[in-house]
Image (cartoon, helix red, strand yellow):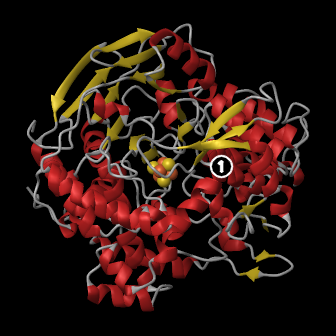
Amino acid sequence: MGKLGGYAGKILKVNLKEKEICSEPIPVNWISRFIGGLGISFKLAYDNASPQKDALGPENVLIFGAGPFVGTLIPGACKTTVVAKTPVSGFLGISGTGHLGMLKFTGYDNLMITGKADRPVYLKIDDDVEICDASDLWGKDTWETTEALWQKLGKQYVVASIGPAGENMAVQASIIVNKYSAYAQSGMGAVMGSKNLKAIAISGSKSISVADPERFSELMDKAYQQSIESQKETINVFREWGTLRAMGPPISQFGPHEYKNYSEIVPPDLPYKFPLDRFMSEIKIGDISCMGCPIGCKHLIRLLKGDKAGGSMAVSCLVGGFHGFAAHCAVEGWEDAIRCDELCNRLGMDYLSAGAAISFAIELYREKIIDKTDTDGLELDWGAADGVQELLRQMAFGQGLGKILAQGLNKGPQLIGKNSEKYAVHTRGHAIYYDPRRAMSPDLFSDMINASGDRFHAPGWAGKAMTKEFLIKHLGMPPDQADQAVTDIKGYGLARFAKWAEDNATMFECLGQCQMPMHQQVELRVWAGLYEALTGIKMNGEKLLQAAGRVWDIRRMFDLREGRTRKDDSFIARRFVSERLVSNCEEHDPVSKESFNALLTEYYNERGWDPADGAVKQLNNDNGFV
Ligand code: SF4
């Protein structure tokens, strides 16, 4: 194992209850079957999480993973993931960030945390691994925690911490890395809190070897040419606007987004409440990059409101805040939108999940299903930012109505009763970005049937991948299958497309590669060549995708063991199947349950799963590739 390039070769295991720390080599056949990073984490979760136990109980396992590309010079090779049974749905949850790659430099590819500490602790990982007392950190927000650990240990440590939301196990709780980048969705911060684990501080200086440096450097140039050199225009827009680019080029339309808990279509004038010239001249201070990425699509921005006004904060995904607060809750203006983002970062909460829960509460209040007696006198309304910010605090600290909302959109409505689930818009508890009544794209379909947290399954492939050539060269689709995917994108092709996009996205996550649109322009054969030159393992695109499919299968097997059925996959929020979506300029019918179910059967067939119940018949292509 030690001879392979790319991999550190070891899994670090920490049992917080027994205070046991050990490391084990990654079995070679795991690498051949599950690639690395996310794939190894899924395998560890399948083997080590006790089935049918509470996601917030001590039997759950929390696993971080960094793939073989992480820490190399490949542009965008920085993505790490965390997985655990999620308290949001009770199935396997996933979240990712580009800022915990330091794990590789400590000599580990994966970190598995089991048990629950008997008091608040943090984990210090450098040349040694130590479980340290965190009593003085408990109760602090993520910024205070990170600053305190930097003061104690030095700024060379990357700090992943939880805030009050994680401590109080709100299902919207995230893990915040270095005060800004989030393992956002799927409640991983709550799982960390359930283990009394306040933070993980990591600093490493070990190196990563390359099996064939000459070939690796040749292919690196190729990857750089395809993702950076030939994408200069796209990169400039990304650098300028970051993820805000998703709002239109740039922020010219909010068109594809939900508004007011999906009760309306985003009005065309909403972007004017967020003037771009002001963003550039008064708010944005600079660009930030994930580890080793030459693009830098994150920002340093000025804070305009609240106790830190005049100061600055780094933001990773500004578009997430727009979805959560400007779109879901109709908050208007930079001051309040940024203040909501800042509160989320400090409290340790995910923008989208928190915004979705609050928009649900606002609608309940307006429909008189709840009133001031339920909100402790707080008035709720669309765009009333003070109410939104107060609910964020209540959710994080487990107080008032916030305590119920912190249970998520699955359990929260059950606690409220009064037919309130009618207004809960989610997929098995997870908030979703887009409204399927407007358009069912392959990535939205994937998001709806596979919801497990961060929507990395098939991000943005659909927009550009409509040519047969792209499907073959980039997604690795066989030519005969690509024909149908192109010509029948609303029917059979959509389910097929979703499957191939998922496998590609899974491959990226297992390798540790960012899959922003620029990186998606690199051909599959280049990725496979880079893997081969880096690790010394003979590889081609087909084999990489087969392994990614197997990773997807083991994720499915975890969920089936937890009781997942076809009924879970075919769940569509009531609003989407019962209400028309109407505005002055457009109208859309509800989603047809029959059509959705037909797509689901096609999807199961594409995956080779049982079309009746989605059971995995045989772990996908179970012949290893080593
Ligand atoms: S493109 Fe953006 S998200 Fe991707 S690695 Fe680079 S800075 Fe990070």
What percent of the width, then of the height, locates residue 341? 70, 40
Q: Work out whether 203 lies above or below 220.
A: above
- Amino acid at circle 1: Leu
Q: Quadrant of the C terminus?
A: bottom left
User: Residue 58, located in which quarter of the rendered image?
Assistant: top left
Relative depth, front residue between 277 and 250: 277
Residue plotted at (48% across, 67% down) = 231
Image quadrant in which the N terminus is located: top left
Q: Is residue 212 above or below residue 135?
A: below
Q: Position of residue 17 (x, y in %)?
A: 35, 15
Query: Considering the numbered disc 1 on the image, is that residue within a helix, a strand or a loop?
Result: helix
User: Left or right: where does residue 185 sit relative to residue 352?
Assistant: left
> What is the x, y in percent for residue 425?
66, 58
Q: Position of residue 222 (x, y in %)?
A: 30, 64
* Picture layout, residue 456 above or below residue 201: below
Residue 348 in sight from this viewpoint: yes
Q: What residue is drawn where x is 54% and y is 54%?
A: 428
Q: Which residue is the site of mark 1? A: 318
Q: Is residue 418 visible to us here?
A: no
Instruction: Decide if residue 272 is on the left or right side of residue 623.
Output: right
Q: Is the residue indicated by label 1 positioned so its CB lies within 8 Å of ligand 1?
A: no
Task: Classify mark 1: residues with Cα within 10 Å, few (<14), some (14-19) or many (20+).
Answer: many
Q: On the rendered structure, is 158 left or right of 324?
A: left
Q: Residue at x 12, y 40 (%)?
A: 27
Location of residue 216 by image quarter: bottom left
Q: Tell whether 360 sits left or right of 37.
A: right
584 up-or-down from 453: above or below = below
Q: Nearer the viewer, residue 59 or 257?
A: 257
Closer-to-camera residue (556/387): 387
In percent of the image, x 47 and y 59: which residue is there? 516
